[in-house]
Amino acid sequence: MQSRFPALITKRGIAITGALQISSAPNPFLPSILFYIDTGADITQINEVEIAKLGLDIRGLPRSTKPVISCGGRVQAHVINSPIILLLDEDRSHKEFIGLPYLHATEQPLQKGQRGNLLNRLLIPNLLSRDFFIKFGLKLIVDFKTNKAYIEN
Amino acid sequence: MRCRGEGDLFWDISNRLGHLVVEWSDMAVQTQINEKEMAEKIHEMNENRLWLDKTLDALRKDYSDKYIAVFRKKIVDADPDMKKLIIRIKKEFGNIDTIMIEYISGEDYFLIL
């Protein structure tokens, strides 16, 4: 059955808000999480703010086995196993996307007590990336003329 | 409905069992997810995002180089230290699911990723 998930065209990119379920988190269900869609990024990731919302300490999570490189250089990344991402379709019924082996969580580059430059202080956005689209065979449809965007299966 | 990536062992097994496992899972999940509530929270989050896009330039005056916490299209707290801000809003609101946290830079910038 075909589903269409409406996305949002924002000043900083195409975004979609969904929900996230992490069975190992103290607060396992995060009902609203805004992801920017980044087909240039290899891996889906969430930032430290979302980790805090889930009731987790990012430094307590296992580190990524591969280096993670952002535009500002290498970032410290951790992994959360078996995430479930939920999106609402046009009919407002939810679909669960299960099967991503892990979700990356990146630390804010700025260390305690440091002021840092602009790049250090910007929050790395939550990204719904190529791994997600490939895994679930999804399409991204964007029309900048009408300001409408969708994810479709 | 559950959407599984191709090649998942669970998916293969459930197919062989005539989708029994998937159907059971769907029933289990339906009891947990309140779609109306989820839709409201998603709407609220999207509204916060669009409001922030519109007001960003005006916010630079008062919140330059600070992290802000946005709840129902209002700034409820701000701090140059993100972690201090999270601790404070958690204390105040308890559940911070629908609070959006964003850094307000002193000047606008182009972002290339």
Image (cartoon, grey):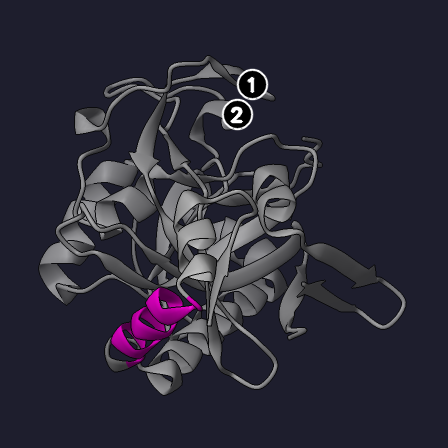
**Which residue is painted at 40% across and 82% down in the image?**
B40
Residue position marked by numbered label 2 in the rendering: A119
**Residue found at the very far right of the displayed protein:** A145
**Which is more toward the observer, A77 or A87?**
A87
The residue singled out by tag 1 in the image is A72
Res. B31 in view: yes
Residue lying farthest to the left in this orientation: B91
**What secondary structure characterizes most of the magenta part?**
helix
Q: Is residue B52 left or right of residue B11?
A: right
Disc 2 residue type (three-letter): Leu
Looking at the image, which residue is at 31% across and 79% down?
B30
Relative side of B103 to A81, left or right: right
Image marks 1 and 2: residues in contact by CB distance under 8 Å: yes
Q: Secondary structure at mark 2?
A: helix
Q: Total of numbered circles in the picture?
A: 2
Local crowd at mark 2 within 10 Å, few (<14), some, or many (≥20)?
Answer: few
Whole-percent x, y for residue B69 in the image: 34, 57
Q: Amino acid at mark 1?
A: Gly
Question: How far, Cα to Cα, is label 1 from label 2?
Answer: 7 Å
The boundaries of the magenta stretch are B18-30
Looking at the picture, does residue A19 appear above or below residue B28? above
